[in-house]
Amino acid sequence: MSDVRVRTNDEKTGRPGAESWRMVEPPEKEPRLGRRYGAALLGGGIVLMLAGGLGVGGWRHYQAAREAAALAEQVRTAVPDVRVAVVRPSGDIMKITLPATTTAFEAANIFARTSGYIEKRYVDIGAHVKKGDLLADITAPELDQQIAQAQATLAQNQATLQQTQASRELADVTNARDSNLVKQGWLTAQQGDNDRLTLRAQQAAVGVAQSNIAAQEAQIRVLQQEKAYQRVVAPFDGVITQRNVDNGSLVQAGSTFMFTLMHSKVIRTQVFVPQDEAFGVTPGIDADIRVPEIPGRTFPGKVTRIATALQPGSRTLLTEIDVPNPDGLLNPGIYCTVELSIPRKTPSMIIPSDALVFDENGLHVVLVRNGTVHLQQVSIARDFGTTVEVREGVQPGDQVVLNPAVSLAEGSKVTVRKVVVS
């Protein structure tokens, strides 16, 4: 117990009143000690929980480390499964497709061979003609006058020849008669020489007259040929593709371009075969011509002519193919593609494109031989998309890994899971 001063409020006014002393008992100490003991227990529990958590975490970390090491060892010692494809040889026939352009089997630009005017034109663009058909008539009245004049000159030369022949016969008779008289002494030797030389001169004159006649006859034939050229005819069967004259047009011999005639019953196609395939190209091999605008139609043909040398700039071989065109569906000058069936001269192999690997080691494939991996360099000849043609590096029957993993190295052990037919 202890005395404590206590201020109380006035009951009437509610204001603080006079201070007074009262006896107050001190608080007990037992509850304070209980609170301290509970806090100690709580702290110890927390420490135990933390220690347990650390122990569990350490154990789990240890277990995870053991599992990771075991997995790494399993991966290191595991033999992976791979999918492989068997390398097969290429066929005996190599098919290549090349762009080409069609041309007419025969084509001729027809020029005027005589001067004059077009009297009548009989054909136009697109006309089908036969060999010898009349295309146009050319009129040249002055040519007729030249022929008449040449014929008159020929008649004059023929008359001169007759006169010269008569003079030669007279000289021959005179020389024969006088030669006997000279031998008998009735005529002088000079007279005999004159008669003999006169005969020789008349014989030469006959030769000159005959030559003049031959020359004049040749001139007449030239003029008559020019006269024949007034009729312009087709040199072969074909189609008129160009026409540059009309009725009344003036044409000059050798310079006026009149018509273009093309023979399209057979189409000639020219292609340039690359050097890799050129060694197998020979006349007679099969060819298929396709036109994009004529889908579903193939025009068969054969190689008919090849150049004997490759072009130095492009290293290609000029090849001509004749294609029958009886229905006229193919026209000269169109774009087409030519598929050649060329006998293979150099061996090659076919592998899937998925087997190719290109990295710091270059272009190679992964081979499996007796369960062991081998990296093999290859050289590609042609790419077909899903497959490629390889010149060297692999042999028929080799197994190549499809989509090989980066971890596959030289000498790695693998097991073949599936063989894919390429």
Image: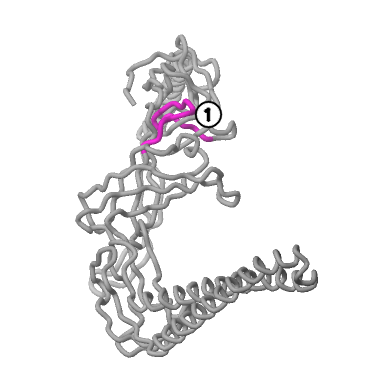
- Which portion, as a residue range, is magenta? 341-358
User: Relative to 137, does residue 235 appear above or below in the rendering?
Assistant: above
User: Label 1: few (<14), some or many (≥20) within 10 Å?
Assistant: some
Membership of 349 in magenta stretch: yes
Residue at the spot 45% in from the left edge and 85% down from the top edge: 152
Membership of 13 in magenta stretch: no
Residue at the spot 35% in from the left edge and 56% down from the top edge: 105
Q: Nearer the viewer, residue 419 or 128?
A: 128
Image coordinates for residue 132, horizontal then vertical, percent? 29, 66
Mark 1 residue type: Val
Total number of numbered labels?
A: 1
Residue 39: which quarter of the image? top left
Q: Nearer the viewer, residue 261 or 8?
A: 261
Q: Nearer the viewer, residue 328 or 227?
A: 227
* Colour basis: one colour
Image coordinates for residue 376, horizontal then vertical, percent? 54, 23
Q: Is residue 341 visible?
A: yes
Locate the C terminus by quadrant.
top left
Residue 115: which quarter of the image? bottom left
Q: Is residue 33 visible?
A: no
Farthest residue toward the top?
370
Q: Secondary structure at mark 1?
A: loop
Residue 36: which quarter of the image? top left
* Residue at which label 1 appears: 378
User: Relative to 361, does residue 122 appear above or below in the rendering?
Assistant: below
* Drawn side of residue 239 relative to residue 173, left or right: left
Q: Nearer the viewer, residue 276 or 29?
A: 276
Residue at the spot 41% in from the left edge and 31% down from the top edge: 343
Locate the N terminus by quadrant.
top left
